Image (cartoon, rainbow, N blue to C red):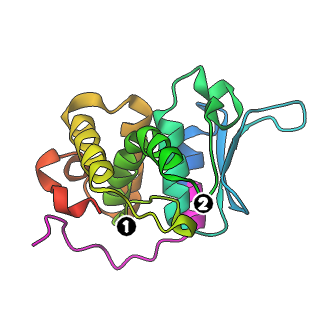
Amino acid sequence: MSCLESLADTPHRCEDLIAVFNRCFQDSHNTVLIGGADEPLYQIADPDNTHHRIYFTRDYYASGLHEIAHWLVAGEMRRQQEDYGYWYAPDGRNPEQQLAFEQVEAKPQALECILARAAGFPFRVSADNAEAGLMPSTEFCQRIYSELREYCNGRLNERSLTLIAALADFYGSSAHKACEAARYCQEDIR
């Protein structure tokens, strides 16, 4: 039996996610969320674009949550670099590259899970490597769960708390419940 509560029947439109995010951070952090991209990308402000931009894939709500989670995890210095200065290998990674991917993805995916709970949206672990046929490893899922519990036990930054509260308010859920470690089970992270 899963620890997850039933999810809301509220439609999850990317336009709503964009509006909630931009209300929270466009002015305070000069950052906007933009959908419709072929590939996700974080770009810093430049002479042609006055805002930092978080692009997410097409119209996928889950992609929006995931890219937001990366931004929330990134510190001030990382947010001054394109794609936060991280290495990325596309789908088709070999096992060694997949392990490196999983090491940097546990924190954002744990935070994505909390954001999804606040929005009443289902969370699914992403190995982001379907082409190679590699599914999320048990170790990766355990690492995500461990990070999730750390976040719920006081490690959420102010930006994360702001967005969790805004999503909970918009979708009529509970920010407190989304941040409560006891409401998550290891078997929910798969």
User: In percent of the image, x 52 and y 68: which residue is there?
Assistant: 130
User: In percent of the image, x 28 and y 44: which residue is there?
Assistant: 143
Q: Nearer the viewer, mark 2 or mark 1?
A: 2
Residue lying furthest top in this view?
A: 77
Up the image or down, 9 lies above or below 157; here it is below
| Highlighted range, magenta | 1-19
Q: Position of residue 34 (x, y in %)?
A: 68, 54
Q: Position of residue 141 (x, y in %)?
A: 29, 53
Q: Position of residue 182 (x, y in %)?
A: 11, 49
Q: Tell me if residue 87 can be seen.
A: yes
Distance of mark 2 from mark 1, alpha carbons? Answer: 28 Å
The residue that label 2 is drawn on is 92
Few, some or many residues within 10 Å of mark 1 (<14, 14–19, 20+): many
Q: Along the horizontal axis of the image, is 162 left or right of 138?
A: right
Amino acid type assigned to the residue bearing label 1 in the image = Phe
The residue that label 1 is drawn on is 121
Q: How many marks?
A: 2
Q: Secondary structure at mark 2?
A: loop
Residue lying furthest front in this view?
A: 95
Residue 136, quarter of picture: bottom left
Q: Secondary structure at mark 1?
A: loop
The answer to whether residue 3 is magenta is yes
